[in-house]
Image (cartoon, rainbow, N blue to C red):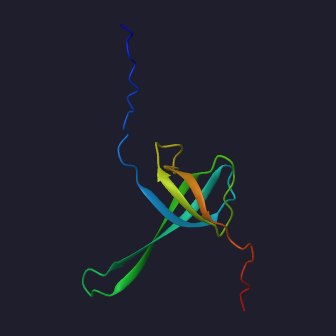
Amino acid sequence: MAEETKNIAVDRGVRKERVGEVVSNKMTKTIVVRVQRRFPHPKFKKVVTGYAKFYAHDEKNDAKIGDTVRIEETRPLSKLKRWRLVQVVERSSGVTPVAA
């Protein structure tokens, strides 16, 4: 009888994912992503917008400022980096708005 080897996939659990806009790519292999969250105010019930900044690892320096990206939670990579780039969802047009 031949022994069968079963490939058992190790489930790492559910990792958090966020979609946000790249606000900085000045660092090597690192991007800063601003994630928008809308929620009702606890007291006044008006919908407010909250923002959070995440430092994410971009191995190929693929993301540019203004791109919409998907990031995923990962092990700590540095003092601030706990996320990694999964994909660039939408490329920016590359045109920066001129302040009047």
Of 8 and 73, nearer the camera is 8
Horizontally, residue 45 falls left or right of residue 11, namely: left
Q: Residue furthest front?
A: 1
Residue at coordinates 42% horizontally, 79% vertically from top-left? 49
Does 33 appear above or below 36? Answer: above
Horizontally, residue 62 falls left or right of residue 16, namely: right
Does 46 appear above or below 85? Answer: below
Label total for image = 0
- Quadrant the C terminus occupies: bottom right
Q: Residue furthest top?
A: 1
Q: Residue furthest left?
A: 43
Q: Position of residue 87 (x, y in %)?
A: 58, 56
Residue at coordinates 38% horizontally, 33% vertically from top-left? 10
Q: Quadrant of residue 26?
A: bottom right
Q: Quadrant of residue 1?
A: top left
Q: Position of residue 80 (x, y in %)?
A: 51, 51
Does 15 appear above or below 89? Answer: above
Residue at coordinates 38% horizontally, 82% vertically from top-left? 48
Horizontally, residue 26 falls left or right of residue 11, namely: right
Q: Position of residue 33 (x, y in %)?
A: 56, 63
Q: Position of residue 53 (x, y in %)?
A: 51, 64
Residue at coordinates 47% horizontally, 46% vertically from top-left? 74
Of 41 and 90, nearer the camera is 90
